[in-house]
Amino acid sequence: MSYDDTTFRRQNDQTETDPAAYRRRVQYDDATASTLDQSLRAPVTTTGSFPAVEEDGRDRLGVHLGWEVVLLLATAAIGFLLFGEDSAALERPALDALLVTGAAIGLLTLGAGLSLRAGVPNLAIGPIALAAAFQYAENGDRGLITALAPALIIGAAGGLIVAIVVVALHVPGWAATLAAGLGVIVYAQLRVAPVVVQGDWNPTDQAFLLFGGFALLALLGGALGAVGPVRRWVGAFRPSGDPARRPGSRAAVPVVLALIFSSVCAVGAGTILAAGTDAPVVPGTGLEWTGIGIGLALLGGTSAYGRRGGIFGTLFAVTALTLFLDFENRRELDIALFAIAASVFAAGLIVTRLVETYGRPLPAGTGEEWNAAASTGTWSPDRPETWNAPPAPQPARDGRWDDGPWGATR
Protein backbone atom coordinates (compact mmCIF):
# COMPACT_ATOMS: atom_id res chain seq x y z
CA MET A 1 0.00 0.00 0.00
CA SER A 2 1.40 3.44 -0.94
CA TYR A 3 0.51 7.02 -0.20
CA ASP A 4 1.22 9.76 -2.77
CA ASP A 5 2.28 12.73 -0.73
CA THR A 6 2.88 14.87 -3.80
CA THR A 7 -0.64 14.27 -5.10
CA PHE A 8 -2.03 15.11 -1.68
CA ARG A 9 -0.22 18.44 -1.64
CA ARG A 10 -1.26 19.30 -5.16
CA GLN A 11 -4.89 18.77 -4.30
CA ASN A 12 -4.69 21.03 -1.31
CA ASP A 13 -2.22 23.63 -2.62
CA GLN A 14 -4.66 25.43 -4.95
CA THR A 15 -4.88 29.05 -5.89
CA GLU A 16 -7.57 31.06 -4.07
CA THR A 17 -9.28 33.54 -6.36
CA ASP A 18 -11.23 35.41 -3.68
CA PRO A 19 -8.85 37.10 -1.18
CA ALA A 20 -11.66 37.96 1.23
CA ALA A 21 -12.92 34.39 1.30
CA TYR A 22 -9.43 33.05 1.79
CA ARG A 23 -8.73 35.40 4.69
CA ARG A 24 -11.96 34.37 6.39
CA ARG A 25 -10.95 30.70 6.03
CA VAL A 26 -7.45 31.38 7.32
CA GLN A 27 -8.81 33.23 10.35
CA TYR A 28 -11.19 30.36 11.09
CA ASP A 29 -8.49 27.73 10.87
CA ASP A 30 -6.14 29.85 12.93
CA ALA A 31 -8.75 30.18 15.67
CA THR A 32 -8.99 26.38 15.90
CA ALA A 33 -5.21 26.07 16.22
CA SER A 34 -4.86 24.11 13.02
CA THR A 35 -1.44 23.75 11.46
CA LEU A 36 -1.04 26.72 9.12
CA ASP A 37 1.80 28.69 7.66
CA GLN A 38 3.26 30.48 10.67
CA SER A 39 3.95 33.59 8.60
CA LEU A 40 0.21 34.20 8.54
CA ARG A 41 0.03 34.39 12.33
CA ALA A 42 2.22 37.47 12.54
CA PRO A 43 0.41 40.79 12.17
CA VAL A 44 1.14 42.26 8.78
CA THR A 45 0.02 45.68 7.60
CA THR A 46 -1.22 46.11 4.07
CA THR A 47 0.47 48.52 1.72
CA GLY A 48 -1.09 50.91 -0.75
CA SER A 49 -4.71 52.02 -0.84
CA PHE A 50 -7.75 51.25 -2.88
CA PRO A 51 -8.25 53.72 -5.72
CA ALA A 52 -11.04 56.22 -5.27
CA VAL A 53 -14.14 55.59 -7.30
CA GLU A 54 -14.69 58.30 -9.90
CA GLU A 55 -18.16 59.77 -10.23
CA ASP A 56 -19.86 58.53 -13.36
CA GLY A 57 -22.52 61.22 -13.36
CA ARG A 58 -25.39 58.97 -12.32
CA ASP A 59 -27.80 60.88 -10.09
CA ARG A 60 -30.96 59.94 -8.28
CA LEU A 61 -33.93 62.17 -9.13
CA GLY A 62 -36.01 60.87 -6.24
CA VAL A 63 -34.56 63.40 -3.81
CA HIS A 64 -35.40 66.22 -6.24
CA LEU A 65 -38.97 65.06 -6.74
CA GLY A 66 -39.45 64.72 -3.00
CA TRP A 67 -38.14 68.23 -2.37
CA GLU A 68 -40.28 69.62 -5.19
CA VAL A 69 -43.37 68.30 -3.45
CA VAL A 70 -42.32 70.32 -0.38
CA LEU A 71 -41.84 73.40 -2.58
CA LEU A 72 -45.27 72.92 -4.12
CA LEU A 73 -46.88 72.77 -0.69
CA ALA A 74 -44.97 75.88 0.41
CA THR A 75 -46.10 77.72 -2.73
CA ALA A 76 -49.71 76.77 -2.09
CA ALA A 77 -49.42 77.95 1.53
CA ILE A 78 -48.02 81.35 0.52
CA GLY A 79 -50.70 81.71 -2.14
CA PHE A 80 -53.35 80.94 0.46
CA LEU A 81 -51.92 83.63 2.77
CA LEU A 82 -51.90 86.15 -0.08
CA PHE A 83 -55.47 85.30 -1.02
CA GLY A 84 -56.51 85.70 2.60
CA GLU A 85 -54.77 89.08 2.77
CA ASP A 86 -56.37 90.37 -0.43
CA SER A 87 -58.30 88.14 -2.79
CA ALA A 88 -57.95 90.76 -5.56
CA ALA A 89 -54.19 90.07 -5.65
CA LEU A 90 -54.86 86.91 -7.65
CA GLU A 91 -57.31 88.57 -10.01
CA ARG A 92 -56.68 90.81 -12.97
CA PRO A 93 -55.24 93.45 -13.28
CA ALA A 94 -53.18 92.73 -10.13
CA LEU A 95 -52.49 89.23 -11.39
CA ASP A 96 -50.89 90.64 -14.55
CA ALA A 97 -48.37 92.65 -12.53
CA LEU A 98 -47.71 89.56 -10.41
CA LEU A 99 -47.00 87.46 -13.50
CA VAL A 100 -44.67 90.09 -14.96
CA THR A 101 -42.65 90.18 -11.74
CA GLY A 102 -42.55 86.39 -11.74
CA ALA A 103 -41.33 86.33 -15.35
CA ALA A 104 -38.49 88.75 -14.59
CA ILE A 105 -37.39 86.83 -11.50
CA GLY A 106 -37.82 83.60 -13.42
CA LEU A 107 -35.46 84.72 -16.19
CA LEU A 108 -32.81 85.56 -13.61
CA THR A 109 -33.28 82.17 -11.97
CA LEU A 110 -33.13 80.32 -15.29
CA GLY A 111 -29.83 81.95 -16.17
CA ALA A 112 -28.44 81.32 -12.70
CA GLY A 113 -29.60 77.70 -12.75
CA LEU A 114 -27.98 76.88 -16.08
CA SER A 115 -24.71 78.51 -15.05
CA LEU A 116 -24.77 76.52 -11.81
CA ARG A 117 -25.39 73.26 -13.63
CA ALA A 118 -22.49 74.04 -15.95
CA GLY A 119 -20.22 74.58 -12.94
CA VAL A 120 -19.69 78.31 -13.64
CA PRO A 121 -22.13 80.27 -11.43
CA ASN A 122 -22.69 83.66 -13.01
CA LEU A 123 -22.49 86.23 -10.20
CA ALA A 124 -22.84 89.09 -12.69
CA ILE A 125 -26.51 88.49 -13.50
CA GLY A 126 -27.71 91.06 -10.94
CA PRO A 127 -25.47 93.93 -12.12
CA ILE A 128 -26.28 93.02 -15.75
CA ALA A 129 -30.01 93.20 -15.00
CA LEU A 130 -29.59 96.62 -13.36
CA ALA A 131 -27.52 97.91 -16.27
CA ALA A 132 -30.17 96.67 -18.73
CA ALA A 133 -32.84 98.44 -16.68
CA PHE A 134 -30.92 101.71 -17.01
CA GLN A 135 -30.44 101.09 -20.72
CA TYR A 136 -34.17 100.70 -21.27
CA ALA A 137 -35.10 103.55 -18.94
CA GLU A 138 -32.90 105.96 -20.87
CA ASN A 139 -33.64 104.71 -24.38
CA GLY A 140 -37.08 103.15 -24.17
CA ASP A 141 -38.70 106.08 -25.97
CA ARG A 142 -36.88 104.96 -29.14
CA GLY A 143 -38.72 101.67 -29.14
CA LEU A 144 -38.32 98.32 -27.43
CA ILE A 145 -36.09 96.75 -30.08
CA THR A 146 -33.85 99.79 -30.36
CA ALA A 147 -33.35 99.92 -26.61
CA LEU A 148 -33.05 96.17 -26.08
CA ALA A 149 -30.79 95.13 -28.97
CA PRO A 150 -27.57 96.87 -27.78
CA ALA A 151 -28.02 95.46 -24.28
CA LEU A 152 -28.50 91.95 -25.64
CA ILE A 153 -25.43 92.18 -27.87
CA ILE A 154 -23.23 93.58 -25.12
CA GLY A 155 -24.53 91.02 -22.62
CA ALA A 156 -23.90 88.09 -24.98
CA ALA A 157 -20.44 89.41 -25.91
CA GLY A 158 -19.56 89.87 -22.25
CA GLY A 159 -20.69 86.34 -21.46
CA LEU A 160 -18.56 85.00 -24.32
CA ILE A 161 -15.46 86.89 -23.15
CA VAL A 162 -15.85 85.65 -19.57
CA ALA A 163 -16.37 82.10 -20.84
CA ILE A 164 -13.15 82.27 -22.85
CA VAL A 165 -11.30 83.47 -19.76
CA VAL A 166 -12.76 80.66 -17.66
CA VAL A 167 -11.99 77.94 -20.19
CA ALA A 168 -8.57 79.22 -21.32
CA LEU A 169 -7.19 79.99 -17.87
CA HIS A 170 -9.29 77.36 -16.07
CA VAL A 171 -10.25 79.76 -13.29
CA PRO A 172 -13.39 79.37 -11.16
CA GLY A 173 -16.48 80.69 -12.87
CA TRP A 174 -17.68 82.54 -9.81
CA ALA A 175 -14.41 84.50 -9.64
CA ALA A 176 -14.41 85.49 -13.32
CA THR A 177 -18.08 86.48 -13.32
CA LEU A 178 -17.69 88.43 -10.08
CA ALA A 179 -14.90 90.45 -11.68
CA ALA A 180 -17.13 91.08 -14.69
CA GLY A 181 -19.99 92.04 -12.40
CA LEU A 182 -17.87 94.61 -10.61
CA GLY A 183 -17.10 96.18 -13.98
CA VAL A 184 -20.81 96.36 -14.82
CA ILE A 185 -21.52 97.99 -11.45
CA VAL A 186 -19.20 100.83 -12.47
CA TYR A 187 -21.47 101.49 -15.47
CA ALA A 188 -24.58 101.47 -13.30
CA GLN A 189 -23.12 103.78 -10.68
CA LEU A 190 -22.26 106.48 -13.22
CA ARG A 191 -25.81 107.64 -12.51
CA VAL A 192 -26.07 109.81 -9.44
CA ALA A 193 -29.86 110.04 -9.43
CA PRO A 194 -32.79 107.73 -10.22
CA VAL A 195 -33.73 107.49 -13.90
CA VAL A 196 -37.35 107.71 -14.93
CA VAL A 197 -38.40 105.16 -17.53
CA GLN A 198 -38.89 106.85 -20.91
CA GLY A 199 -40.45 103.99 -22.82
CA ASP A 200 -44.15 103.24 -23.20
CA TRP A 201 -43.95 99.44 -23.52
CA ASN A 202 -46.18 97.81 -20.92
CA PRO A 203 -45.25 94.18 -20.29
CA THR A 204 -48.49 93.56 -18.39
CA ASP A 205 -50.22 93.35 -21.78
CA GLN A 206 -48.23 90.15 -22.40
CA ALA A 207 -48.16 88.98 -18.77
CA PHE A 208 -49.43 85.46 -19.42
CA LEU A 209 -47.17 85.10 -22.47
CA LEU A 210 -44.08 86.21 -20.54
CA PHE A 211 -44.70 84.02 -17.52
CA GLY A 212 -45.80 81.12 -19.71
CA GLY A 213 -42.57 81.41 -21.71
CA PHE A 214 -40.53 81.29 -18.52
CA ALA A 215 -42.49 78.29 -17.23
CA LEU A 216 -42.03 76.45 -20.53
CA LEU A 217 -38.28 77.08 -20.54
CA ALA A 218 -37.99 76.00 -16.91
CA LEU A 219 -39.84 72.72 -17.47
CA LEU A 220 -38.05 72.03 -20.75
CA GLY A 221 -34.66 72.67 -19.15
CA GLY A 222 -35.53 70.48 -16.17
CA ALA A 223 -36.71 67.66 -18.43
CA LEU A 224 -33.55 67.80 -20.53
CA GLY A 225 -31.45 67.90 -17.37
CA ALA A 226 -33.12 64.69 -16.24
CA VAL A 227 -31.59 62.88 -19.24
CA GLY A 228 -28.32 61.37 -18.06
CA PRO A 229 -26.08 62.10 -21.08
CA VAL A 230 -27.36 65.68 -21.35
CA ARG A 231 -26.88 66.29 -17.62
CA ARG A 232 -23.35 64.92 -17.69
CA TRP A 233 -22.48 66.96 -20.76
CA VAL A 234 -23.75 70.21 -19.25
CA GLY A 235 -22.01 69.51 -15.93
CA ALA A 236 -18.70 68.38 -17.41
CA PHE A 237 -17.00 71.43 -15.83
CA ARG A 238 -18.14 70.38 -12.36
CA PRO A 239 -15.11 70.76 -10.07
CA SER A 240 -13.48 67.53 -8.91
CA GLY A 241 -9.98 66.54 -7.92
CA ASP A 242 -7.01 68.80 -8.51
CA PRO A 243 -8.12 72.26 -9.76
CA ALA A 244 -4.93 72.47 -11.82
CA ARG A 245 -6.28 69.73 -14.08
CA ARG A 246 -8.17 71.17 -17.00
CA PRO A 247 -11.24 69.34 -18.26
CA GLY A 248 -11.45 68.23 -21.83
CA SER A 249 -12.57 70.43 -24.69
CA ARG A 250 -16.07 68.96 -24.48
CA ALA A 251 -16.58 70.95 -21.27
CA ALA A 252 -15.91 74.27 -23.04
CA VAL A 253 -19.11 74.30 -25.09
CA PRO A 254 -21.60 74.11 -22.18
CA VAL A 255 -19.58 76.72 -20.27
CA VAL A 256 -19.78 79.15 -23.20
CA LEU A 257 -23.48 78.50 -23.76
CA ALA A 258 -24.32 78.79 -20.06
CA LEU A 259 -22.57 82.13 -19.55
CA ILE A 260 -24.01 83.64 -22.73
CA PHE A 261 -27.52 82.39 -21.95
CA SER A 262 -27.41 83.57 -18.34
CA SER A 263 -26.21 87.03 -19.39
CA VAL A 264 -28.95 87.34 -22.03
CA CYS A 265 -31.57 86.22 -19.49
CA ALA A 266 -30.32 88.89 -17.08
CA VAL A 267 -30.74 91.56 -19.79
CA GLY A 268 -34.31 90.42 -20.39
CA ALA A 269 -35.08 90.38 -16.68
CA GLY A 270 -33.76 93.92 -16.17
CA THR A 271 -35.75 95.23 -19.10
CA ILE A 272 -38.98 93.66 -17.83
CA LEU A 273 -38.40 94.98 -14.30
CA ALA A 274 -37.83 98.51 -15.59
CA ALA A 275 -40.81 98.49 -17.94
CA GLY A 276 -43.17 96.79 -15.50
CA THR A 277 -43.15 99.52 -12.87
CA ASP A 278 -43.87 103.23 -12.73
CA ALA A 279 -41.04 103.81 -10.24
CA PRO A 280 -37.70 105.15 -11.51
CA VAL A 281 -34.64 102.94 -11.72
CA VAL A 282 -32.42 103.67 -8.72
CA PRO A 283 -28.59 103.41 -8.90
CA GLY A 284 -27.13 100.51 -6.95
CA THR A 285 -25.06 97.38 -7.33
CA GLY A 286 -27.64 94.84 -8.44
CA LEU A 287 -26.01 92.20 -6.25
CA GLU A 288 -29.27 91.67 -4.41
CA TRP A 289 -30.71 90.32 -7.67
CA THR A 290 -27.71 88.03 -8.01
CA GLY A 291 -28.55 86.65 -4.59
CA ILE A 292 -32.20 86.26 -5.56
CA GLY A 293 -31.45 84.47 -8.84
CA ILE A 294 -28.79 82.07 -7.58
CA GLY A 295 -30.56 81.55 -4.26
CA LEU A 296 -33.79 80.51 -6.00
CA ALA A 297 -31.89 78.18 -8.33
CA LEU A 298 -30.31 76.51 -5.30
CA LEU A 299 -33.64 76.42 -3.49
CA GLY A 300 -35.20 74.77 -6.52
CA GLY A 301 -32.75 71.89 -6.25
CA THR A 302 -29.83 72.89 -8.48
CA SER A 303 -26.57 71.93 -6.81
CA ALA A 304 -24.02 74.63 -6.03
CA TYR A 305 -21.37 72.17 -7.23
CA GLY A 306 -22.92 71.78 -10.66
CA ARG A 307 -24.67 69.14 -12.80
CA ARG A 308 -27.38 68.04 -10.39
CA GLY A 309 -30.82 69.60 -10.57
CA GLY A 310 -34.54 68.90 -10.54
CA ILE A 311 -37.42 69.33 -12.97
CA PHE A 312 -40.13 71.50 -11.38
CA GLY A 313 -38.08 73.09 -8.61
CA THR A 314 -37.22 76.33 -10.45
CA LEU A 315 -40.85 77.00 -11.37
CA PHE A 316 -42.10 76.33 -7.84
CA ALA A 317 -39.35 78.36 -6.15
CA VAL A 318 -39.89 81.40 -8.40
CA THR A 319 -43.66 81.25 -7.94
CA ALA A 320 -43.32 81.01 -4.16
CA LEU A 321 -41.00 84.02 -3.93
CA THR A 322 -43.15 86.09 -6.31
CA LEU A 323 -46.21 85.46 -4.15
CA PHE A 324 -44.24 86.24 -1.00
CA LEU A 325 -42.96 89.56 -2.37
CA ASP A 326 -46.51 90.64 -3.15
CA PHE A 327 -47.72 89.45 0.25
CA GLU A 328 -44.88 91.27 2.01
CA ASN A 329 -45.67 94.45 0.07
CA ARG A 330 -49.38 94.33 0.91
CA ARG A 331 -48.67 93.69 4.57
CA GLU A 332 -46.10 96.52 4.53
CA LEU A 333 -43.50 94.37 6.21
CA ASP A 334 -40.77 96.44 4.55
CA ILE A 335 -38.20 93.63 4.36
CA ALA A 336 -35.01 94.63 2.58
CA LEU A 337 -34.40 92.81 -0.70
CA PHE A 338 -30.88 91.98 0.47
CA ALA A 339 -32.35 90.27 3.55
CA ILE A 340 -34.71 88.23 1.38
CA ALA A 341 -31.84 87.31 -0.95
CA ALA A 342 -29.66 86.23 1.98
CA SER A 343 -32.45 84.09 3.44
CA VAL A 344 -33.20 82.40 0.13
CA PHE A 345 -29.50 81.83 -0.50
CA ALA A 346 -28.95 80.27 2.93
CA ALA A 347 -31.93 77.95 2.45
CA GLY A 348 -30.60 77.03 -1.00
CA LEU A 349 -27.25 75.98 0.47
CA ILE A 350 -29.06 73.60 2.81
CA VAL A 351 -30.92 72.15 -0.16
CA THR A 352 -27.58 71.70 -1.97
CA ARG A 353 -26.29 69.65 0.94
CA LEU A 354 -29.45 67.55 0.76
CA VAL A 355 -29.08 67.05 -2.98
CA GLU A 356 -25.41 66.15 -2.80
CA THR A 357 -25.92 63.74 0.09
CA TYR A 358 -28.87 61.81 -1.29
CA GLY A 359 -28.59 62.54 -5.01
CA ARG A 360 -25.72 60.15 -5.61
CA PRO A 361 -26.60 56.47 -5.94
CA LEU A 362 -24.84 54.08 -3.58
CA PRO A 363 -22.08 52.08 -5.29
CA ALA A 364 -22.62 48.38 -5.77
CA GLY A 365 -19.69 47.53 -3.48
CA THR A 366 -18.27 49.87 -0.90
CA GLY A 367 -15.13 47.86 -0.27
CA GLU A 368 -15.68 47.69 3.50
CA GLU A 369 -15.80 43.89 3.59
CA TRP A 370 -12.72 43.71 1.38
CA ASN A 371 -10.80 46.07 3.64
CA ALA A 372 -11.86 44.18 6.74
CA ALA A 373 -10.70 40.90 5.25
CA ALA A 374 -7.41 42.27 4.02
CA SER A 375 -6.59 44.16 7.21
CA THR A 376 -5.02 41.08 8.83
CA GLY A 377 -3.58 39.47 5.72
CA THR A 378 -0.55 39.80 3.53
CA TRP A 379 -2.36 40.92 0.42
CA SER A 380 -1.89 44.43 -0.94
CA PRO A 381 -3.19 46.12 -4.09
CA ASP A 382 0.37 46.39 -5.40
CA ARG A 383 0.83 42.62 -5.48
CA PRO A 384 -0.68 40.07 -7.81
CA GLU A 385 -4.09 38.82 -6.78
CA THR A 386 -2.85 35.23 -6.45
CA TRP A 387 -3.26 33.45 -3.15
CA ASN A 388 -1.66 30.10 -2.36
CA ALA A 389 -3.21 28.16 0.43
CA PRO A 390 -0.74 26.67 2.93
CA PRO A 391 -0.14 22.94 2.70
CA ALA A 392 -2.60 20.76 4.52
CA PRO A 393 -1.34 18.92 7.63
CA GLN A 394 0.17 15.51 7.03
CA PRO A 395 -1.71 12.53 8.45
CA ALA A 396 -0.21 10.82 11.46
CA ARG A 397 2.08 7.94 10.60
CA ASP A 398 2.85 4.75 12.41
CA GLY A 399 5.72 2.38 12.11
CA ARG A 400 4.25 0.62 9.11
CA TRP A 401 5.19 3.46 6.82
CA ASP A 402 8.61 4.18 5.53
CA ASP A 403 9.91 7.74 5.35
CA GLY A 404 11.27 7.19 1.88
CA PRO A 405 9.74 8.43 -1.32
CA TRP A 406 6.45 7.01 -2.63
CA GLY A 407 5.67 5.59 0.78
CA ALA A 408 7.24 2.15 0.07
CA THR A 409 6.30 -0.47 2.62
CA ARG A 410 8.80 -2.47 4.51
Image (cartoon, rainbow, N blue to C red):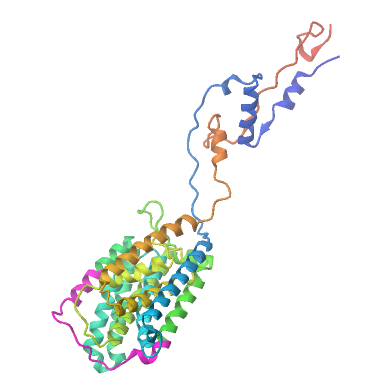
The percent coordinates of residue 261 (x first, y second) are 37, 75
Query: In which quadrant is the N terminus drawn?
Result: top right
Is 379 a magenta residue? no
Is 72 drawn above or below residue 385 in the view shown? below
Looking at the image, can residue 305 be seen? no
The location of residue 315, given as percent across then percent down, is 44, 75
Which quadrant of the structure image shows residue 39? top right
**Which stretch is magenta?**
180-208
- Identified at 35% across, 71% down, the residue is 259
Residue shown at the point (35%, 68%) measured from the top left: 294
Q: Quadrant of residue 38?
A: top right
Residue at the spot 45% in from the left edge and 69% down from the top edge: 71
Vertical arrangement, residue 95 with respect to residue 13, above or below: below
Q: Is residue 320 left or right of residue 126?
A: right
Residue 222 seen in render: yes
**Is 208 placed left or right of 140 in the picture?**
right
Q: Which residue appears farthest toward the right when viewing the image?
A: 1
Q: Residue 199 appears in which quarter of the rendering?
A: bottom left
